[in-house]
Image: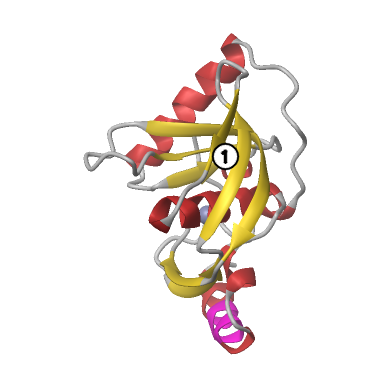
Amino acid sequence: MDIKIYPDPVLFEDCEEVSVINDDFIAKVNEMIETMRNADGIGLAAPQIGILGRFFVCLDFSTEERVDSLVLINPVITEKKGRVESKEGCLSIPGFYEYVYRYEEIEVKALDLKGKEIVYCPTGLQSVVFQHEYDHLDGILFPERMNSITKDIFMKKINKEFK
Ligand SMILES: [Zn+2]
């Protein structure tokens, strides 16, 4: 799978809820996980591979080896609290890293690949990754979470790099 690079317009679209979890969908998700891992990423959202569906994959940080991946389908953030600064990058804006603001703790409800609802209460890096990937489903890239001065400088840099 090719990862869409900024400023590809697909990265700014709103995604639609996933209505069917079938074999085709599961195959696509598995391919996404492989694409994420091959790119040394920690998360990848559907629009980043050109699919306008509300789902993303990311590493499972609950184990140290990070051998497992998580798939969140139709995620909804139901609680958010606290604020942290997190230095982030994005596979769609390769090579650029910057500090953004995130909630410290969130509660997220999402379906897994079996269509079962799971409630996650991530903290730390897992929480930040969930928020970063979730934003992609609303067409929001991480510069939107920077303070305005940092964002201006960052946007100038990436607009020069990616045309
Ligand atoms: Zn990203």
Residue found at the far left of this picture: 65
x 72%, y 27%: residue: 18
**146 to 58, vertically: above or below:** below
Image quadrant assignment for residue 62: top left
- Which residue is under mark 1? 49
User: How far across and how far down the image is residue 49, in percent?
Assistant: 57, 39
x 59%, y 59%: residue: 6
* Few, some or many residues within 10 Å of mark 1 (<14, 14–19, 20+): some
x 55%, y 20%: residue: 113
Horizontal arrangement in the rendering, residue 22 relative to residue 129 (left or right): right
Horizontal arrangement in the rendering, residue 90 relative to residue 49 (left or right): left
Q: How is the image coloured?
A: secondary structure
Q: The C terminus appears in which quarter of the rendering?
A: bottom right
Horizontal arrangement in the rendering, residue 63 relative to residue 140 (left or right): left
User: How far across and how far down the image is residue 31, in percent?
Assistant: 46, 26
| Residue 154 located within the stretch drawn in magenta | yes
| Frontmost residue, 150 versus 4 | 150
| Frontmost residue, 52 versus 131 | 131
Residue 119 visible in the snapshot: yes
What's drawn in magenta, residue-wise?
Answer: 150-156
Say which amino acid is labelled 1: Ile
